[in-house]
Image: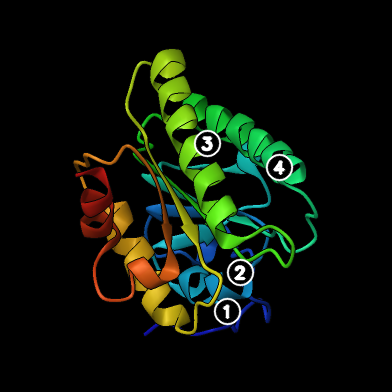
Amino acid sequence: MLTDVDGRAGLACGVRPHSETARTPSIAVIGDALPCLAALCAAPEVERFPDAASVTGGPRAVVIGIDIRALRTRRHLRATLRDIEGQCATLCRRLRGLEHVVLVLNGSPVVSEDTVLRICDSVTRRIHTRLEQACGRSVVITALLAEGCNDRDHLAARVIARARERDSLDAGIALRWKEITHTSIGAAGMNEYL
């Protein structure tokens, strides 16, 4: 069962010692410790790392928490996402089994959700293309705007299901929380793709 807070660390998305994981985690979490990611971080197949350079093992998916509440302009958002693009390149070079990167963003009080979605959609496609050209393989990039997420367990289940998907037509996609509340990320992405 997923919980909101990792009791061993006492914090949302606490870093677990390697000896506590029963098997190699299939999902790594880096970036900002967003409250909506607490249930995901408590899942047994997830391990929290401080940054992209410290991710070890062979995770097939990496979730990056991105706190955009303090960003005041579209320019700041784009700059933040350019940094994320660099982290994705680092991850792709280091992790041969990497198949998915999921960017989870909270809401911005200044930049509209539509603007954030449009920028993220463009960025996910650009990151996918860059990784394909630089690393010679396809990594699915998904951005989730988790503003308004009122069910952390459900979000965790959706992200875990996305990480387990093998093939995906939507190699770079941005979705709102409300788009995945009643369907999987893959199905919602397919609808956007078509």
* N-term mark: 1 or 2: 1
Evaluate if marks 1 and 2 touch, with contact meaning CB atoms under 8 Å apart: yes
Residue corresponding to mark 1: 6
Q: Position of residue 31 (x, y in %)?
A: 65, 53
Mark 1 crowd level (few <14, some 14–19, many ≥20, 10 Å Cα): many
* N-term mark: 1 or 4: 1
Q: Amino acid at mark 4?
A: Thr
Residue corresponding to mark 4: 80
Q: Amino acid at mark 2?
A: Cys
- In this rendering, position of residue 182 left or right of residue 121: left
* N-term mark: 1 or 3: 1
Residue 34's quadrant in the figure?
A: bottom right
* N-term mark: 2 or 3: 2
User: What's the CA distance linking mark 4 and mark 2?
Assistant: 21 Å
Which labelled disc corresponds to residue 13? 2
Q: Nearer the viewer, residue 61 or 149?
A: 149
Residue corresponding to mark 3: 123
Q: Nearer the viewer, mark 1 or mark 4?
A: 4
Mark 4 crowd level (few <14, some 14–19, many ≥20, 10 Å Cα): some
Q: Residue, x 52% and y 36% (percent of image)?
A: 123
Q: Amino acid at mark 1?
A: Asp
Q: Which corner quadrant holds the C terminus?
A: top left
Q: Residue, x 64% and y 40% (percent of image)?
A: 81
Residue 113's quadrant in the figure?
A: bottom right
